[in-house]
Image: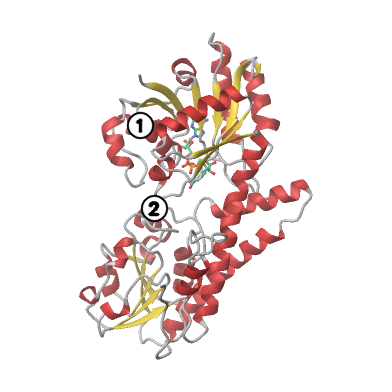
Amino acid sequence: MRDVISVVGLGKLGLCLATCFAERGFDTVGVDINRDLVDSINAGVSPIVEPGLGEIISRLGGKELRATTNHDQTIEQTDVTFILVSTPSEPDGGFSNKYVEAALKSLGEALGRSEKSNHIFVVSSTVIPGSTDKSFIPLLEEYSGRKLNEGFNVCYNPDFVALGKVLSDFWNPDFVLVGQSEPSAGDRIASVYRRMCKNDPAIVRTSIINAEIIKVSLNAYITMKIGFANTVAQMCERTPGADADVVTGTLGMDKRISPSYFRGGLSYGGTCFPRDTAAFVRFCEQCGCNGELIEASEEVNRRHNRHLCEFVLEQISSVKDKTVSILGLAFKPQTPVVVESPAIELIDELLKNGADVTVYDRFAMDNVREIYGERLRYANSPEECISKSSVCVITTPADEFKQIDENCITSPIKLIDCWRILDPSRLGENVEYVPMGRGQEVEGCVGASVQ
Ligand SMILES: NC(=O)c1ccc[n+]([C@@H]2O[C@H](COP(=O)([O-])OP(=O)(O)OC[C@H]3O[C@@H](n4cnc5c(N)ncnc54)[C@H](O)[C@@H]3O)[C@@H](O)[C@H]2O)c1
């Protein structure tokens, strides 16, 4: 039997979640206030770039996954509604709940008009801890005319997914977190995940406030790891014979550390880490405790961006012309998102210094063109991008860039490899290879061997 479920907010995450449900056998109703987006989904065309998404929407859009602008359909046709609308950052580091509140108002009103006995609202947007108790539950009570756990339940169920692999992260989470207003609501959400997930994840059931704190704490913790790995990379870069990958790779073998998100490279960016660290600090302040640890991570991250710019400027100072190519524009591979991307700060700095910049990224070209217009040149392939420059910077560890070898390089070039993804022995004589995070080579100094 097909289970029926609804998702409100069909953006980068909500559309992926709705698609994951539909693909795993749920009849899914998706709601968004953006009519163009709704029409596109129903026509089988994904309005969002995310690996795997387009193919599923072309099969299920308008059928097993039906989009609408009408919030009432979630109440009429389903018993569980996930809310995944955006929560923009506020100047003080907190999140604005205005879109979640607007969605809950529409949903509460629809429930008020309905005669059904119960509905479960699952907030999945990232929020400042305390939002559900202080704002969302009172709002639902006001607009539905019902009381919590007497006609509706609320769960807080945040997502731990990364852009570029959202579908596979939804299907194969390390764990599922459900903050519940009542055990029966948590049971229902747990059963939904047992059916939707392809792995068999642990499902943590707890209070709503614990779940809210866990969500803002997780990303804040990961940024500390990233900052540490980047600090080790800078250390190694300045130390003859040292190699950041050997150092962090070995440290990561210790179970207390783990190798995940523990590789020196560029600063973190995107739509989550910078926002979530700021929110963690904000919540610390609200609680009257000290957020210095995470403020330090933020500062380390900003300085690491400066370090990239200085590193590249130093490298171009010794070449005759200032033609620079940048491979990778988004904050990570496989996504078009350029928000807080290290490549963007680098482009700004290069343009300020009079460089002639050519760029390439399989997913993010349109977003970069919107920012820079004619101030940059845009290449159609990594090879074309490289051919336009005397210095090339690889800013993301995209699989496509890992294929670069001497056949892609037709004239002498300095190649700055920020993530050490290339094997210099395959690059040929035209290339001066400059890895970040690795000190000057010392003869007889081996990388590492594990026995
Ligand atoms: N992007 C990430 O990597 C990521 C990861 C984990 C958590 N999150 C959190 O998930 C939430 C959603 O993020 P996103 O990146 O998908 O946002 P998004 O901006 O891509 O999408 C939000 C969607 O909600 C729709 N919307 C707004 N108000 C609505 C309403 N009243 N009713 C119906 N639809 C409405 C918008 O039209 C838009 O399509 C945020 O809280 C974010 O912090 C994001």
Choose between 426 and 385: the one closer to the eye. Answer: 426
For label 1, the residue is 24
| Residue under the image location 75 percent in, 50 percent down | 285
Kindly give the residue lying farthest to the front in the view shown: 451
Residue carrying label 2: 336
Q: How far apart are marks 1 and 2 (CA)?
A: 26 Å
Mark 2 secondary-structure assignment = loop
**Dot 1 surroundings within 10 Å: few (below 14), some, or many (20 or more)?**
some
Q: Which residue is drawn at 30% across and 41% down?
A: 54
Neighbour class for label 2 at 10 Å: few (<14), some, many (≥20)? many
> What is the quadrant of the C terminus in the image?
bottom left
Vertical position of residue 375 compared to residue 371: above or below: below
Q: In this view, does 83 lie above or below 395?
A: above
The answer to whether residue 189 is seen in the rendering is: yes
Q: Is residue 31 left or right of residue 411?
A: right
User: Residue 396's spot in the image, x, y percent?
Assistant: 40, 64
